Amino acid sequence: MAHKRVLVKFSGEALAGEAGHGIDTQILKFIAQEIKSLVEAGIEVGIVIGGGNIIRGVTAAQDGIIKRTSGDYMGMLATVINGVAMQEACEHAGLQVRMQTAIKMEQIAEPYINRRAVRHLEKGRVVIFAAGTGNPFFTTDTAATLRAVEIGAEVIVKATKVDGVYDKDPAKFDDAVKLDKIGYDQALQDHIKVMDDTSIALAKDNKLPIIVCDMFKEGNLLDILHNENMQNCSIVK
């Protein structure tokens, strides 16, 4: 097996589907089945979900009515809503799941405790990490890298709508070239929108690879992580 413990990061927008906002339960069901295939293959899985399908802190604070700090906390709460939905979908698929939040809300989830999270993973439970880092001005990309490092994940999977990283937007340019392997420094220098710069720098410091792949291609996550099929993804390392 190529990887024993991984952290999967995907955006809140991915849950919205064609509506562009809210949560599409059919997408929840699909993602839960993809996560289940990893667990059944013996891979320990942590998950971080964004909150952009509900609200983004930066966007909420644009006109100055809402402070950036308040906007970011609103975004953290959005990730909790998405986390609850993902937990329900995974449990409906037959998985054991625990959600931990960086902001205490015991009626909904466990507080984030690193040792407890690792123990859950060791027992084969999926762990969803919600509420970002618990601090404003940090994205869920950074939260994903931080949690991945803390739990000892071997790789981060940035699950997107494209099959990897391109030198320019493949939706706009027919001559866009897929980059199979990218160095951390190149990703930072060229501002390649894999993850934000803070998260990439943290991954670099901890020698944590980032795999970018299409989350909507059935079986793709398992093919990459279990079978080491790297044709349908890009890797930053």
Image (cartoon, rainbow, N blue to C red):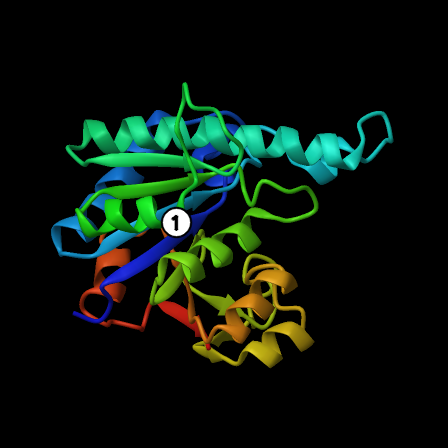
Which residue is rendered at x = 41% and y = 32% of the image?
83
Q: Secondary structure at mark 1?
A: helix
Which residue does the numbered mark 1 point to in the structure image? 114
Residue 39: give x, y in percent of width and height.
18, 49
Position of residue 200 relative to residue 89, above or below, is below
Which residue is rendered at x = 32% and y = 59% of the image?
6
Residue 65: give x, y in percent of width and height.
85, 25
Quarter residue 158 falls in: bottom left
Query: Can residue 216 be seen by looking at this rendering?
Result: no
Q: Amino acid at mark 1?
A: Asn
In-front residue for pair 118/59: 118
54 sits left or right of 82 in the view: right
10 Å crowding of disc 1: few (<14), some (14-19), many (20+): few
In-front residue for pair 195/131: 131
In-front residue for pair 187/43: 43
Which residue is rendered at x = 56% and y = 67% of the image?
202
Position of residue 199 relative to residue 93, above or below, is below
Which residue is rendered at x = 61% and y = 80% of the image?
185
